[in-house]
Every structure is written in C-alpha cells, then in structure tokens.
Amino acid sequence: MSEGYRAGIDIGGTFTDLVLLEEATGRQVIGKILTTPEDPSEAVEKGLIELLEGEGVTASRLKTIIHGTTLVTNALIERKGARTALLTTEGFRDAVAIGTEHRYDMYDIFIEKPEPLVPRSLRYGVRERVFDDGSVALELDEEQVRQIIAELRERGVQAVAVSFLHSFRNPTHEQRVAEILAEEAPDITVSLSSEVAPEIREYERTSTTLANVYVRPLVERYLLVLKERLGRLGFGGSLYIMLSDGGTASVETACEFPIRLLESGPAAGALATAFYGRKSGFREALSFDMGGTTAKACLIEGGEPLTSSEFEVARIYRFKKGSGLPIKTPVIEMIEIGAGGGSIARIGPLGLLKVGPESAGAEPGPACYGRGGSEPTVTDADLALGYLDPNFFLGGRMRLDREAALRAIEEKVARPLDLDPAEAAWGIHQVVNENMANAARVHAIERGKDPRAYPLFTFGGAGPVHAYGVARALGAPGFIAPLGAGATSAFGFLCAPLSFEFVRSLYGQLGELDWEQVNGVLEELEGEGRNLLHASGVAEPDIRVRRLCDMRYTGQGHEVTVEVPDGRLSSRDTGRLRELYRKEYRRLYQREGPDVPLEAMTWRLEVTAPRPDIQLGGKGDSSSLAQAQKGTRKIYIPERGGFREVPVYDRYRLVPGMVIEGPAVVEERESTVVIGESGRADIDAARNLIARWS
Amino acid sequence: MSEMRRLDPILLEVLWNRLISVVEEQARALMRTSFTSVVREAGDLSAGVFDRRGRMVAQAVTGTPGHVNAMATSVHHFLREIPAENLQEGDALVTNNPWQASGHLNDFTVITPIFRDGALIAYFGNCCHALDVGGRGLGADARQVYEEGLFVPVTHLFRCGEPNEELFRLIRANVRAPFEVIGDLYAQAGSNDLGGARLLEMVEEFNLGDIEALSEEVCSRSESAMREAIQALPDGVYENEAYTDGFDQPIKLVVSIHVEGDEMHVDYSGSSPQSERGINVVLNYTAAYTTFGVKCAISPEVPNNAGSFRPLHVSAPEGCILNARHPAPVGARHIIGHFLPGVIHGALARAAPEKVLAEGSDSLWNTQITGYKKDGEPFTYVFFSGGGMGARPTEDGLSATAFPSGIRGVPAEVIENISPVIMHRRELRPDSEGPGRYRGGFGQEMEIGVRGDSGWNLSAMYDRTRFPARGMRGGLPGAVGSVRTASGEPLHPKRQQRIAGGERVVLSLPGGGGYGSPLERDPELVARDVDDGLVSVERAREVYGVVLKEGGHPGTFIVDVEASTHLREDMKPASGA
C-alpha cells in the first residue's frame, strides 16, 4: 500500500473532531473545531485544512476519509426532516399509528406513544394487493397513483415512503410507483420498504422506511456539499461513511440508506474503546463518552461492544423502551442521555438544581464562550471550579471568559439557592455526574452486569473532566483516558476494518433448496464485496469473507443465524447445516426444538479488510515528571470544601511508567483529565492514563 | 442469615435487576422459539422465577396481567400435587387446570425446578396460550368445561430431561393443531431451562448459595412499598358497578373496596351469578386482574411479586360470575376479567381522581377462525385486538391499545403468512372516541376474510357492543363496538358462526371514554383530529363546540375562534353545568 494518510471525522452536536493518521508510522494528529450547524461540512473543511497545514502535507496524500455524523439522529429527534408522505396498501394507512397496540409499561397508565413522522392526512392508501406468497391479488391502480402524486406536488411534499404489504416478497408494485414518481415528480425523493428494510412486519418496515426518506434529502444535500468541498481541497481518495453497527459504506449507499448512519459517532467511540482494550489488555470496560450535547455509555465485553439488530430512535417518554420509533438496522447497543458540556443548569419547579437535557449547543454555547450565551452550563461550572484553563481551551485556540461563567452561575443558580458561586458550580458538576452515573448504571444493570466491576473508559471533550466523579459515583475501580481523548470517536473510525455486509432473501426448506440458485446469489454478493474492497486498495489475499444463513424450524417466527461452510454448497451439505443450526440453537436456548424440518430465510455475506494496525504509545519528550509539569492552578477540592493549588501536567510529556498523585490536572489540547484527591494515575505502555483509588 | 447482611443496597439493586433481566431473557426465548403468533407476536405469555418456597420473586414485564398474576399462585398448586421432594433435575411439570392457573384450558403453565449441586434452589415458570386444546375450540359457547377441550392435571411434561411421550401422544390426538401445540410446549420447557441456566450463573458469580435471602429482601421491600401506597389513600369504602354485554343477558359487576390503614380488601358481592356459557371467571383470574387494576392506579412503580400481593385481599362469593365453580365453562373468561381494572378505577376515582383512567374498550377482542385451506387441510387461527383506551386525567386515551391486557396485535403480514386469513383493512375508527377535555382513544376497524371459496367458522369473543365505555368527570362515553358481515348482516358478538365462502367480516372495536368536559378541549386539538379525518366537522361542532372553516388546502381546517367561543358559551347551560 502506498504511504499516505487516513482521516477520521466525527461531527457531534457541538464539536467536529478530526484525526489524521500517518499510515507508515501510526502517528496521529488531532483537531477539534466548533460544529457549524447551518452547513456542517464547513467545519469539516476548515478543520481539515488546519490539520493538513499543521502537518505540511497536501490533501492529495490523503487516501481515505471515514466520516460519521449525528445529522440523522438530530433530524429525527427534532423532527426537522423533509415534508414526507406515505403511500401504503389501501386499508393500512394507520399501521404506523396503530403500531403494535402494545403498552410498553404494564403498570404506567400515563405512557405516551410516538406520533408517526407523517400525519394521517399525508398517509395515502393505494389500491393494490400482493399476498404473502408474492402473488398479485389486485393490480396496482396506476391512475390513482398519478392522482395522488399530483396532490403531493400541490401540497409541497418533498419525500415519499412507499410501503406495501408483502413487498419484501414481491416488490414490483413498489418499484412501479417509484418509476411513476420519477416520471411525474422527479424532484420528490422516494424510498421503498422493499429496499430499506425487506423484512416481514409492516409496522417496523414502514417506520424504518419513513425515517429513511424523512432524512434523505438532508443527508444527500449534506454529502454532496461535503464531496464538493473535499474535491476543492484536492482530495482524490475514497470517502466512506461509518454505519451504526461499526461497518462502513460508500457515499452512494449512505445517500440511499441514511437511516443506517443513525448512531455512527457513538458506535465509533465504542469501537475505539474495544481497540484500546485489546491493546492494553482490558477486555471488559464501560465506555463513557461525554461531548458538548450528550453522554453515551456502552458495555464492552470480551473486547467487543454489544450489538443489536434493531434500535429505537427519539424516545419521547422518560427514555423508555417502546416510546421511540422502531428502526430495523444493525447497531451497537448503548445508552445516550442529554448530559454534556453544554447542558444548561437551572432551578426546577421543586426548587431543586436540574442540569440538562437542554443544551446551549455550539450556538450560542456556554456563557464562557462569549457568543451571547447567558445560561450557566456544565462547561461554565467546570471553568469556575478551575478544572478547565480559560487560556488553554482547545489548546488556547478559544479563550474562555471565566467572569461570564461566574456571572451566569451566580445569577441563575447561586443566588436563588443562596449558595456561593463555587458551591453552586460544584453542585452543577455533581448533579451532572450523578445523572450520567445513573444512566450508565441502568445500562449495565439492565444487562445484568455489575457496574462496579468495569473500569470507565473515558473520552469526548468533557469525559475526562468528569470521569473521576462519575467513576466514583458508579463505584467503578478506576478510569482510563487515552491519549487524544478529545477525539476518540473520530479515531474509532480509523480502527474499524473496512467491511461491507450484503443481505438477500432466498426462502426454502433446507431439504428442497435450489442449491445452484443459492451458490449463484452467494457468488454474486461475494464478487460485489470484493470489488468494493479492491477499489479501496485492499489486496485480494487480505479479504476475509463470511457467509451466514438465517434459519428456523418450520413454523417458528424468529431465526437463528448460522455460519455457512466455505465453498460451493450442494444437497450433500444439508446434514452439516442442520448440525450447525442445532448446535447454535442449543447454545442459545439450552434445548433442541421438536423434530421438524428447517427452513432457510435469508443469506448474508460479509467482506472485511484486515483490522488496521495502529501503533500506540511512542515516545514523549520528557524524562522526569517535574519536566512534564507545566505549572500549578487552584482547583475546587470538595473534600476540603474549597480551592487548593494543584500541579498541572502536560499530557504530551507524560511517558510510560510515570505516576501522578491526585489531586492533579492533566491537560491536552482537546480535553483535560481531572484526578481527584484520592486518585493515583499511571501511564501505561500505550500512553493511556489509568487512574485508580483505594 | 450471614447472607442477609451481605445484601447492601447496591448489591441488592444489582441482583434484583439481574433477576429481572434473567426472566426477561426467559420470556424472550419463549417468544423467539414459539411456533404460534399468539405467543411470539402477541406476547400472550408470562415468565417468572420463584424461590424454594414457591413465592414469585420476579416476573418479566413482557406478557399479560392475567397470566403473570395468575401464575404467581400456581407453583403452590403444582407442589401440592407433586411435592418438591419427588422432583428431580431435568423435570418439567405442566397443567392447564383453569382453577389452579390462568382461568381457561387454553393456557398451559410449565414449571421447572432448578437444582444446584443436587439441591433444589428455585423454580422457573411460564404460561402461554395454546393455539388449540380440542373440544369445541376457543369460544364462549360451551355449557361445561368438559366441552372446552383436553384437561391436563399437574403432570410431568419432561422427566429427567426425557419427554413424557404418553402425554405428548395424548395431546397430539386431542388438538386441532398438534404441530404448533407440541412445538410451543417444547419452547416453554426450553425457556425455563434458559432461565435456570442464567440463574445458576448468577448464583455462582455472586457466591449466593440460593436466592432465599434475596427473595426475602425483595418481597419485604415490595410489601412495605405497597402498604405505603395503600396508606396514602383515605380510609373508607369505595364502590362501583358496571354492566357488560354477557352472553345473551347483561352481566352486572359490583365492587366494594375497603381501605383500612395499610390493607385493602376488594370484594365483589352483588355481582351476577355464574353464567351458563363460557364467560365465567375463576377466583385466581379475578384476583389477577384485581391486583393489576389496583396496582396501576396506586403503585405502578412497586415491583410485582409475592410481597406486593400481601396487603391486598380479594374475595367473591362462590358461584358468582367472578368465582365460578367447576365444571362451569370458562373458555372466554377474559371477557369479564378484563372489565375489573376499569370497575376498580371507577371506584377509586373518589379517592384518587388524578391517578385513574376513564373506562376504555377494556375487554380484548379475541377472534378464532377455523376452516379448511385450499388443499383441504384444516386450520385454526387466533388473534387478539385492542380498542380505544380510556382518557387519562392529563392526556388523551391511547388509540387501538390493549388495556388492561398487555398483548400486542399481530401484523397483517404475519397473519397472512401463517394462515389463510386475509386482513383486508385495519384502520382507526373515526368518531369512536369518547369526547372530553382529554378524549378517549379511537377504536379500530378491521375487515377480515379467508382465502378460497369454502365457508369458515368465526368464533367471536367480543364485548362493549351494548354498554359503552363511560367517561369520567364530564367526559362522554366512547362508541360501542359491533360485528357484522361486509354485506351488512349483523353477527352475534359471542357465538361461533358460520361465514359463507368469499364473505368478509367487519369488526368495529369500541372507543375509550373521555375525561373532563369536551367543551374544555383545546380547539386546536379538535381541528387536528378533523384534519386527520378522525373526527367529523359536524361532530367537532355538535359535541366539542368547535367551529371549523376550510384551511389552505382542500381537506384541511382551521378553528373559527370567535364562532367557537360563542358556541361553547351557548352550549354550557344546555349541558347542565
């Protein structure tokens, strides 16, 4: 592979993080810049220029960019997508409103259900009908479709989801509607349920398709502009988009299926945690990512994050499962709460201090940003407590106004509660820590795990500032902050191997399958996958292929996934497949099922490039701890009830083997680690800072 | 006792939640390995873990109150029939005795003892709906339980890991869908095994020995929380009565709730005597829905287990519809049982109006269809549907949502995939909501048929076709339900009926009652329902006092504020305020 650079870019609600990786040496350079909500690609361009100029290299040496964004999630939470209509089989326009008819909390009579993304008046029933075997019971009424399209144009609809019954078995009616739309209203974006989520169950499939097309114009516009900007910089390499399950996709695929980008930034953070874990020998951890707007926690077990095949976005009732929109797409499982540096502190109706989930975001931002924000935020509190240095935020590129922070805290929190500003600031810091610890605890406990058993792996701009408090509140044994913790998610994009997954439905009883057809499908998918990886410069012998089949006992409704043996398959393999299935079934459910035939439902194929080998550690430029100390500063020590002078260390001068006694502050450009009074931190071989306490 | 001290509050929280995640996994495994849509899609099941003494410690939130709370007492019945000392590793017991479990033969309860180093430490149990148990088929027509199908007293389903082939043969010979019924019994046994394996891992990991200390702690904390919740209600007697359609004659349900300190006694004296038809309820099932109704009004956050049941006492005179004697027919017992939480909420409205619901559709609408496929094979298919839920004190009622049952609807695609039943239409039912400041939920309307030309049997188990869901505090009643053929011929809501080939049946499910006067409803919300085609322009004016005019686009409306204000003024005295 020719020598060059790779970049990971993660757009968050407040900051855009960038990591530049020199392929030959594994050296990383990090950038962080305020997100530009109007046109997020602007911050990407600016950040990239700064990084490249700092390194003295041209954009042409950049081979690959892997990118993730919160655009999709935000649009769904804030309901800021396109004006969307739904075309569905006549008689079923309320499927998205009726949902599962289920109360997700058995005892709470006050639960709320999410409103569909499309109001009933824009949900159209179309005369057509396909049965479950794919046979057409009623031909598509094309004349009616044309009338509906005329009405959609009149009503200013920008996007249309088409979801007909049983379209995953026979998609021709949906496809025909797409053709008619292309003729009659080429400016309307369309998504077909048979392409977005070709699975049985009309509610979930329709919900996923609606969400996909609802955000599609936004994502298309954004990626188009981004490509233009990158092109202008002279970038000629491959641009990939990170998906919510940690896989990657081309820009074209991302534009078509933007719903698969849902939680890509946090997913990358989880991948990074797993990566560091493998390097540094902790295979179990709780990843804790705190940025400007939200905090996320994800359990890492056996060196891998937990995953799931569905997800709920935009939960509206106490973050409860069941109160969001169901999305059928593979994701890394995590919990997300509205707690970040920008979270606003205020006095609630009961006279208690509340922090978040409202955020000051990047505009106007915390009071200390001096951009017109007047509400006290978590960052303002951290600054008031001395945890942040007003002159070294983002390495000094952004000056913070401590006076403004204190003023906001004084006015909105301290005076109403009759506290001094330092106590009020500490209250804010503590409340947000407690909120995050509670959410992380629930996430661990819901999976039956003891949160006290896992070290916190902390990153994100605000993560290391709060890690000490959150870990203590959880009862965790310690925390780990990697070098470059301020942009770990962006780094996570680079530690994921390039990988693509393809899915094809091909149904049949195991004993009666047309194996020639199966082989044909698998070979076709494999060819497609190999081509994509070749195009990204992966050498043929390095490509790994995995083939899977979802099977079940005939009559069941859920499948078990089995890895299919290599090579061409034939009827001679049925015995082996049956054995593999029974083994996996037994492993999952303890007991075999009754003696009935097996049926194959879906075939999957994954192609994966080798995991990139990134060197960590390397040499810092310091020989003694004294040399690494860049000064002292007064920070708030709650155990002492006031401020104390503590040493401040330069993160880049800390080298393996050094030990720091708390209380202390360790600064890097994009984040700050606070080590409390009972903490003690050492630097491991990979230059991770590992804090523990007795 | 040394273990008791080790349960610090955090460890207790961890273990408790771990138990819940174990039973959730148990329930999920049952759904994922089931052979029927009733279990895997509708979630008509329960799953839970019991301590050595047979007390329920934790339950999956998946499932229905009728199963969960009825199962809570069933382990004691099993152990009375087959004592614990006769149980061995690998055993699984089963029964569908309505009086010992969940009230009709169509539910099998399976209990599995869990052993650690040869010692019995816990039981896992689950209960789910069987697609068929023979007899006349699921319905309300029978006159004795003997007609309702195969009755399996407490028996070994598996013995030392080996299937009890005699029992399986007997079942196979007696039911219409042996393949699905046997498959689900395997799934039930497997799901208990999975729960057991996870429990053993937990006991190992935390070095617990057994779960007795944990169970003690869980139950006693739940009991005191429940006592606190009862204590918060003013002492007194709260009464209510309600009517349901019955089979042919209306059935009266009478409740009196005695609150005394931290104990509550719910009594149903005065309710109708038991019916000659299969809508009778056994006391176990009456208690299950009573507990649920009380809990979701006064203590939704208190965990549901043997401890939280203790301060609550339920009684009904023997021989009344809510405490039927063997051999009364009980096939469609849910029809009456589902009314109980609504009746209880109506009674508690005087004590805690901000915590209770208006009446809703209440009874689940259960449909069983039997007939022949094109190839001449017989089929049987069951699905459940929810109407509108009653309005809440601060929110509208939820539309097409089952309450008090906890089941889910089955997707049309799944119904059509596994049976020849065709769902031609399934939409919200306009103008079915009970108007109110907060309106009741809308019912739904479905049109169903069967593929092919041959006739089929519809077994209807529907209610609220005569007595609508009443509103609360000035809220108006929801629409009653109806069932008819697409050609307009009315059908009986509770009989097995023959439907001609090619004919379709239209089910119109009831709406929920409203809460507060409809004249106080935000006019913008009324306009939105009209825009959505759910409330007619006339109804908006006549019932809500909201005058609408054409909006920007055809079919959209805006509120005529002035006209509405006048109209509402005029309507107030007329409504007798």
Image: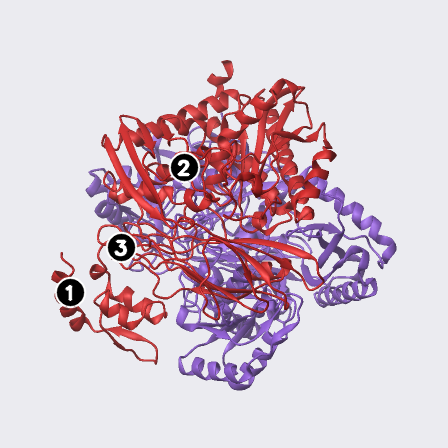
Chain colours: A purple, B red
Which element type, helix, strand or loop, lies under badge 1? helix
Reply above or below: A348 against A474.
Answer: below
Q: For residue A499, say whether it is visible.
A: yes
User: Could you say where residue A585 lies in the image, as x and y percent from the top left?
Assistant: 71, 43
Numbered disc 1: what chain? B
* Label 3 – label 2 distance at C-alpha: 63 Å
The residue at which mark 2 appears reads as: B322
Which element type, helix, strand or loop, lies under badge 3? loop
Residue at 29% of width from left, 52% of height from top? B470
User: Could you say where residue B465 lies in the image, as x and y percent from the top left?
Assistant: 38, 56
Q: Which one is nearer the viewer's eye here, B78 or A200?
A: B78
- Taking the view exactly as shown, the residue that stands out farthest to the top is B1
The residue at which mark 3 appears reads as: A374
Q: How many neighbours does mark 1 have within 10 angstroms: few (below 14), some (14-19), or many (20 or more)?
A: some
Side of A105 relative to B440 (left or right): right
Q: How many neighbours does mark 3 have within 10 angstroms: few (below 14), some (14-19), or many (20 or more)?
A: many
Reply above or below: B320 against A255.
Answer: above
Q: How many neighbours does mark 2 have within 10 angstroms: few (below 14), some (14-19), or many (20 or more)?
A: many
The residue at which mark 1 appears reads as: B571
Numbered disc 3: what chain? A
